[in-house]
Image (cartoon, rainbow, N blue to C red):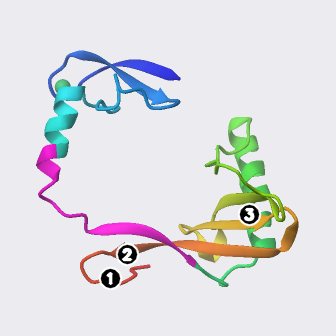
Amino acid sequence: MKTVINRCIHCNIQYTWQASGIPDDRYKKASRDYCNECTIAINEALKSIPKKREFVYEITNEVTVDQLRKWEVRRDEESKQCCGFGKLKRVFSSLYNEELGGKITKEVEGMDEFYGKTYIYSYWSNKPEDIIIKVEREKNLETGELIN
Ligand SMILES: [Zn+2]
């Protein structure tokens, strides 16, 4: 568990914020920017405002897994040339199934004509041929419409 001492950007007190690890009740109300008291006040104020958008993943065939793997390699190479290390990636918790093995899920940022899109692909290690590719889409919660 990593805890960080921050200064609240509203009331200016110093407070401890938990940046990683299993949630600890002592710090769970605080956020990166606000102390416990201010976070609670903000959350209460925001309860009256409904969420308007959410991001959902939808199965797609607009790209192939070969394309995604090439983008992964290209992005890592570009990042190593630029910064000296590979691009930081979101890590998905692993699942395990006796019959299917481990489930591997990877996130890939689109490149070329798909720049700006985020894809994930996943498969079970014992069935690598059954790959599912999904694209992140923005959903308007008021109309149910997918925006991009
Ligand atoms: Zn505060």
Instruction: Verify CB contact (< 8 Å) between mark 1 and mark 2.
Output: yes
Q: Is residue 103 visible?
A: yes
**Mark in front: 3 vs 1:** 1
Q: Horizontal and vertical percent for residue 29?
A: 29, 32
Q: Amino acid at mark 1?
A: Gly
- Ligand 1 closer than 8 Å to the CB at disc 1? no
Identify residue type, mark 2. Lys
At 14% across and 23% down in the image, what residue appears? 11
Q: Is mark 2 within 8 Å of ligand 1?
A: no
Quadrant that contains the C terminus: bottom left
Q: Is residue 9 visible?
A: no
Q: Please check the rendered image and state whether residue 56 is part of the magenta-colored stretch, yes or no.
A: yes
Q: Quadrant of residue 110?
A: bottom right
Whichever of labels 1 and 2 marks the residue nearer the N terminus, that label is 2
- Name the foreground residue: 81 vs 145: 145
Location of residue 55 in the rendering, given as x and y in whole percent from the top left corner: 43, 67
Task: Identify the residue at image location x=19%, y=64%.
Answer: 50
Q: Left or right: where does residue 25 sit relative to residue 94?
A: left
Quarter of the image where one finds residue 139: bottom left
Disc sitting over residue 139 in the figure: 2
Secondary structure of the residue carrying tag 1 is: loop
**Label 3 near ligand 1 (CB < 8 Å):** no
Residue hosting label 1 = 144
For marks 3 and 2, give the CA distance: 26 Å
Q: Residue 133's spot in the image, x, y percent?
A: 67, 74
Which residue matches tag 3?
A: 71
Q: Which residues are magenta?
A: 44-58
Amino acid bearing label 3:
Trp
